[in-house]
Image (spheres, rainbow, N blue to C red):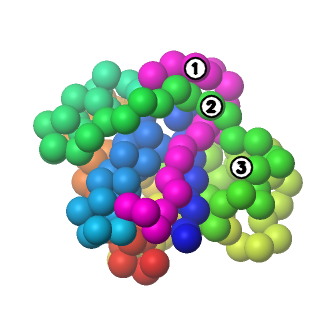
Amino acid sequence: MPRILFVCHGNICRSTMAQFVMADLVRRAGRADEFVIDSAATSSEELGNPPHHGTVAKLREKGVPVGSHRARQVRRDEYGDWDHIVYMDAENAWGLSRILRGDPDGKVSRLLDWTGRPGDVADPWYTGDFEATWRDVLAGCEALLAAL
């Protein structure tokens, strides 16, 4: 059973979008019972907050169910709980390395590195462009699911 943790800075925009997109993709593939999917932050800035209204609006526009979620920070002691720890950008990689203090099992990867166009997932917190984030997240999640 693949266990996937999506990670971004605050856990209210990109990682929550990836969590709900991946959950929807596996559900549509008839594989929902085969996966454990969650998301977390590298920072403590948004702890306890719900997903960003722009993320919620974009997911609803695309027909992706939005579940209950409150931002939380990834913890070093949960490294063993996940098969894949998937981050969104270079800043998240730095934050994860600080928190996890290494990746001995090679579980940590960047979402778009699963696609044919590696790079950082657009951050709507700064751009306000949730459509670009949607495209990046969908491409990454589809590629990750195909690989699994």
- Badge 3: few (under 14), some or many (20 or more) residues near its Cα, within 10 Å? many
**Badge 2 vs badge 1, beta-carbon distance below 8 Å:** yes
Q: Which of 125 and 147 is in front in this view?
A: 147
Q: Which of 31 and 73 is in front in this view?
A: 31
Quadrant (top left, top right, bottom left, bottom right) of the N terminus? bottom right
Q: Quadrant of residue 24?
A: bottom left
Bounds of the magenta segment: 32-50
Q: In this view, does 4 lie to the left or right of 67?
A: right
Residue 18 x, y percent position in the rendering: 40, 49
Q: Earlier in the sequence, mark 1 or mark 3?
A: 1
Residue sticking out furthest to the front? 33
State the SS at label 3. Answer: helix
State the SS at label 1. Answer: loop
Q: In this view, does 124 lie to the left or right of 8?
A: left
State the SS at label 2. Answer: loop
Q: Which of 59 and 66 is in front in this view?
A: 66
Residue depicted at 43% across the width and 63% down the height:
33
Residue receiving disc 1: 48
Q: In the image, what residue type sits under mark 3?
A: Leu
